[in-house]
Amino acid sequence: MTTAPRRRTEADAGAPAPIAPTRPVYRHPGARSRTEEPPS
């Protein structure tokens, strides 16, 4: 358990989880259930 977290740390340094920041961005105060796709 030293190589698995090692790669994840490098990715986090550049971009912390591509799904974490993407969900809150499209998470509108009116559309809470619609978090997967943007209200395009």
Image: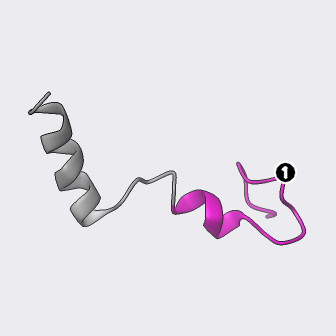
Near-viewer residue (25 or 9): 9
For residue 35: magenta?
Answer: yes
> With 25 as the anchor, is 27 left or right in this view?
right
Secondary element at image label 1: loop
| Location of residue 31 with respect to 34 vertically, above or below | below
- Count numbered badges in the picture: 1
> With 20 as the anchor, is 11 left or right in this view?
left
> With 15 as the anchor, is 7 left or right in this view?
left
Q: Quadrant of residue 32?
A: bottom right
Magenta span: predominant SS is loop
Residue placed furthest toward the top: 1
Residue placed furthest toward the bottom: 29
Which residue occupies 17% across, 54% down?
10
> With 23 as the anchor, is 33 left or right in this view?
right
Q: Residues within 10 Å of mark 1 (few under 14, many from 20)?
A: few
Q: Which residues are magenta?
A: 21-40
Mark 1 highlights which residue? 33
Q: Which image quarter is the N terminus in?
A: top left
| Location of residue 36 with respect to 1 vertically, above or below | below
Q: Give the x, y percent position of residue 12.
A: 28, 57
Q: Give the x, y percent position of residue 8.
A: 23, 45
Q: Give the x, y percent position of residue 20.
A: 51, 55
Q: Give the x, y percent position of residue 11.
A: 24, 53
| Location of residue 3 with respect to 21 vertically, above or below | above
Model colouring: one colour
Amino acid at the residue labelled 1: Ser
For residue 18: magenta?
Answer: no
| Location of residue 15 with respect to 4 vertically, above or below | below
Residue placed furthest toward the right: 30
Residue placed furthest toward the front: 1
